[in-house]
Image (cartoon, rainbow, N blue to C red):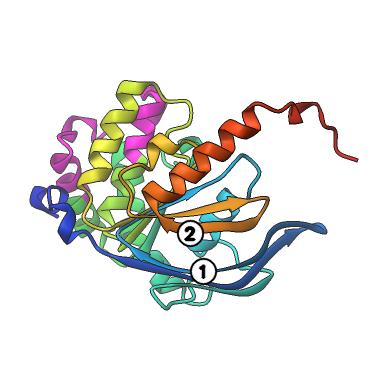
């Protein structure tokens, strides 16, 4: 992987297609996703919605980590739950909390692990790990212990580990939660340069303004899809309206 891959202009970013057909998902009798059907193709796809709207569940479903209870999910016409080889090579996921993703004590071990899972030899994985670190100007992190890193640095390690595997699509599940503004801007800059496609899940409209298409979830259902500027305008108006209410006072029956 060469630096020019990270600097590819937006017009060359890979488009991906998400197809959901009557998708539902429930746990212990509780419906989380309900009757989701849409087809979206773009290089940058945002998923927006309030907390509890089912965004993280959908993120895991798109990455092939969980199967729908009903209906079908396809990413680039592939059912990733059934085709685990495609899931490993085609889609990566960046979780909200890097501590839920990192499993090795050092940076180079963490990056190399996914490459070995893809079928690279240990030598090839080590070479690609060194190349990835160099591309991000982080060669000096190679044998650094994860426990010594800040939260933002851990996020970057997870990002480098995913990008090293060169997936067609990266799913971002609220990756900026709890990060300060400079760290968020730095991570955003790395993601903007990524040539593959992105699906970014967020409740914050500012994270998604530069995206092509948006999917708005509300209470586990599809509210609408469309061009980012149009959906965000409608979403922000609705959130402002709800902010004037006192629905926090309402208790579940």
- The residue drawn where x is 75% and y is 31% is 247
User: Contact (CB < 8 A) between labels 2 and 1?
Assistant: yes
> Is 66 placed above or below 145 here?
below
Q: Nearer the viewer, residue 113 or 48?
A: 48
Q: Position of residue 81 (x, y in %)?
A: 53, 71
Mark yes or no: residue 100 visible: no
What secondary structure prevails in the magenta region?
helix
Mark number for residue 225?
A: 2
On-image quarter of the N terminus? bottom left
Is residue 142 depicted above or below 131 in this figure?
A: above
Q: Position of residue 33 (x, y in %)?
A: 66, 59
Residue farthest along the right direction in this orientation:
253
Give the mark nearest the N terminus, 2 or 1: 1
Which mark is drawn over residue 38?
1
Q: Quadrant of the C terminus?
A: top right
Whether residue 202 sits left or right of residue 33 in the image: it is: left
Nearer to the camera, 109 or 184 = 184
Crowd around label 1: few <14 · some 14–19 · many ≥20 (10 Å): some
CA neighbours of label 2 inside 10 A, class few (<14), some (14 to 19), many (20+): some
The nearer-to-camera label among 2 and 1 is: 2
Residue 154 among those drawn in magenta: yes
The residue drawn where x is 42% and y is 41% is 104
Q: Position of residue 243 (x, y in %)?
A: 63, 28
- The foreground one among 70 and 144 is 70
Q: Is residue 142 left or right of residue 251?
A: left
Q: Residue at coordinates 64% horizontally, 58% vertically from top-left? A: 221
Q: At 59% from the left edge and 63% from the top edge, which residue is drawn?
A: 66
Q: Between marks 2 and 1, how big is the CA–CA gap?
A: 8 Å
**Magenta region:** 129-157
Where disc 1 sits, the SS reads strand
């Amino acid at each position: 992987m060469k630096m020019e891959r990270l600097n590819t202009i937006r017009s060359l970013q890979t488009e991906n297609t998400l197809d959901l057909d009557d998708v539902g998902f429930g746990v212990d009798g509780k419906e989380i996703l309900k009757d989701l059907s849409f087809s979206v193709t773009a290089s940058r796809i945002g998923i927006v919605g309030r907390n509890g709207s089912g965004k993280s569940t959908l993120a895991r479903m798109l990455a092939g980590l969980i199967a729908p209870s009903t209906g079908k999910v396809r990413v680039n016409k592939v059912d990733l739950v059934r085709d685990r080889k495609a899931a490993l090579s085609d889609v990566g996921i960046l979780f909200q909390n890097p501590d839920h993703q990192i499993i090795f004590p050092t940076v180079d071990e963490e990056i190399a692990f996914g490459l070995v899972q893809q079928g690279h030899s240990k030598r090839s994985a080590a070479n690609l790990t060194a190349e990835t670190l160099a591309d991000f100007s982080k060669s000096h992190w190679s044998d650094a212990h994860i426990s010594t890193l800040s939260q933002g640095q851990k996020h970057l390690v997870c990002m480098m580990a995913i990008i090293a595997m060169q997936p067609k699509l990266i799913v971002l599940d609220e990756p900026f939660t709890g990060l300060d503004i400079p760290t968020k801007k730095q991570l955003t800059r790395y993601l903007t340069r990524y040539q593959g496609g992105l699906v970014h899940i967020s409740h914050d409209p500012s994270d998604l303004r530069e995206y092509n298409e948006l999917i708005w979830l509300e209470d586990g259902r599809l509210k609408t899809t469309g061009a980012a500027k149009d959906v965000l305008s409608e979403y922000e108006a609705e959130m402002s309206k709800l902010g004037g209410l006192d629905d926090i006072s309402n208790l579940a029956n």
